[in-house]
Amino acid sequence: MGCGTGRIVSNLEALRPDYDIVGIDFSDEQILAAQSVCFRSDLFACDSIEYEKKYFSRTSGEFDLIFVHGVTQYFPSNDYLFQFLNSSYRMLKTGGNLILIDCSVDWYLEEMKSKPQVTLLSILKSRIRVLVPKFILSFIRRIKKKSVEGYVVESFGNIDLLVPIFDGFWINPQSIEDYSERYFTSYQMNFQPFKHKPIRYKKFRPIFQLQGKI
Amino acid sequence: MKIDAIKNYWNVVSKALPVEKKDHWLDDSGEPLDAQLFEEIAEYLASGENLVQYAGGAEEEF
């Protein structure tokens, strides 16, 4: 989910010709770009909830793995996050995995802390494990290695989340301003979380792995 | 904020950017992350084996 221009999907196609792959992204423009490098995956310009409603071909349980990286920090609310988690859960096979790897802005973590994660907990119950793929360590080193300070553990209910600490990540304000006036205007008008400059992503979001259906 | 506003944001962003930056996987200097990273992520997804599990509170040295 959030396949963007297909840089992961295209590699996965090459590595695993036996996989049936679906890539979705909010952006029509990015899906168009992905279609130029991905040749056998199904690509959709929509969000995951829309995907489930419109395109998901079964009542439940089609996917072995749902991989989400760099997506949930753009969600508009916790309610939407919960819809997304529930939707993902319905689409996973028994024994399937949801791997969720995202960075977070402070407002988002604060929001999560301030509200009971009832829906999240009802989905995950006590079966959550915190997992860090090795590539994430590589990713961290490349992006902002000097500002990685270590990990902290945040607890939400009975879920312990391993959160690498960052100081600035993902969006580079200077580069945004360089891109285009149109982009910048839209970003100011529409994107509440990014209004407060300088943008400071201080934490890397936890990694959830939902293993198996409950 | 609605999900449509976020979709609109990404479409505007994507149209404004060159193809290599459309997905905004950029490093700290605003340059696209190198291709090897995406190969590594795909390898991870393909293998399903290289997960490092942490017990609560465990820390990793970089």
Image (spheres, coloured by chain):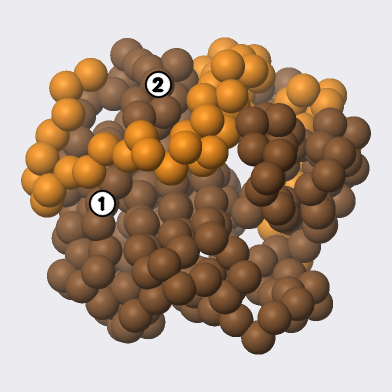
Chain colours: A brown, B orange
Q: How many numbered badges does the structure rendering display?
A: 2
Q: Residue furthest left?
A: B57
Toward the front, the furthest residue is: A18
Q: Is residue A35 above or below residue A61?
A: above
Q: Quadrant of the C terminus of chain A?
A: bottom left
Judged left or right of residue A179, residue B56 is left
| A77 lies above or below B17 | below
What kind of element bears circle 2? helix
Camera-nearest residue between A153 and A114: A153
Q: Is residue A40 visible?
A: yes
Determine the chain carrying the residue at label 2: A
A4 with respect to A39 (left or right): left
Does dot 1 land on a helix, a strand or a loop?
Answer: strand
Q: How far across and how far down the image is residue A122, in percent?
A: 32, 83
Q: Residue at x 26, y 64 (%)?
A: A128
Q: Residues within 10 Å of mark 1 (few under 14, many from 20)?
A: many
Q: Residues within 10 Å of mark 2 (few under 14, many from 20)?
A: some
**Contact, CB < 8 Å: mark 1 with mark 2?**
no
Q: Amino acid at mark 1?
A: Val
Label annotation for residue A214:
none
Q: Pinpoint residue B26: horizontal percent, then vertical percent.
A: 60, 24
Query: Which residue is tagged 1?
Result: A130
Image coords of residue A32 (percent x, y): 89, 42
Residue picked out by circle 2: A138
Q: Out of A144 and A195, give the one closest to the viewer.
A: A144
Q: Residue at x 77, y 62 (%)?
A: A46
Q: Name the amino acid, label 2.
A: Ser
